[in-house]
Amino acid sequence: MKRYEVVLALAAVGAALLLSAAPAHALKTNVEVDGDSAVIKLQGALRTPADDEVALVTATKDVMKTGVAHIVFDMSGRDIDGAGIGALVSAYSMVARSGGQVRLAGLPASISSLVELTALAAMFQIYDSTADAIRSM
């Protein structure tokens, strides 16, 4: 193998590793299904528009494929910005189109304020706990 081929091969491996590494703040989800309802607990910040929206929408789609109609997003201790709100709206739209319901639970005060400021309180029903949110469906 010639020297430039080795350099190109190493560069390709390095680029692949960089692209596959998830950022430290990347959104992760934990799903608990109970009948036709599910709680999707968000872990990490909901900020990076492309990565986090894909993670949230993918988790929502995967849950809906199991026959779950209603979803509670557990926001306990999560950090979120406008892009994160956009991801929640995308997930809400997907669930609503299929006839399901979406609830938000455990919102920190900063997120509650953001939801109020963006007039999304009319879209999302908000509960202190996931148990209260599930009982409401």
Image (cartoon, rainbow, N blue to C red):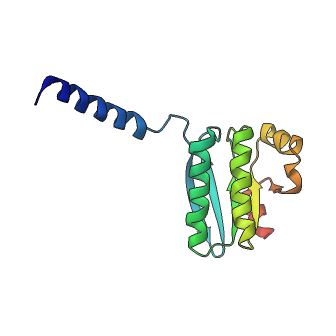
Query: Could you tell me how many numbered marks the image carries?
Result: 0
- Name the residue: 89% across, 55% down: 122
- Name the residue: 79% across, 36% down: 110
**Residue 68 horizontal side relative to residue 24, left or right:** right
Q: Give the answer, above or below, for where 118 lies relative to 88.
A: above
Q: Which quarter of the rendered picture does the C terminus lie within?
A: bottom right
Name the spot of residue 89 as percent of width and height, x first.
74, 53
Regarding residue 137, the answer to whether it shows in the image is yes
Regarding residue 75, the answer to whether it shows in the image is no
Name the outermost residue toward the left: 1
**Residue 73 horizontal side relative to residue 119, left or right:** left
Name the spot of residue 28 as percent of width and height, x first.
55, 48
Name the spot of residue 15 as percent of width and height, x first.
36, 33
Q: Give the answer, above or below, for where 93 lies relative to 100.
A: above
Q: Which quarter of the rendered picture does the N terminus lie within?
A: top left
Q: Nearer the viewer, residue 2 or 71?
A: 2
Q: Nearer the viewer, residue 30 or 118?
A: 118
Name the spot of residue 20 as percent of width and height, x first.
40, 40
- Name the residue: 62% across, 48% down: 53
**Residue 133 horizontal side relative to residue 118, left or right:** left
Q: Nearer the viewer, residue 94 or 59?
A: 94
- Name the residue: 32% across, 31% down: 14
Q: Nearer the viewer, residue 82 or 41?
A: 82
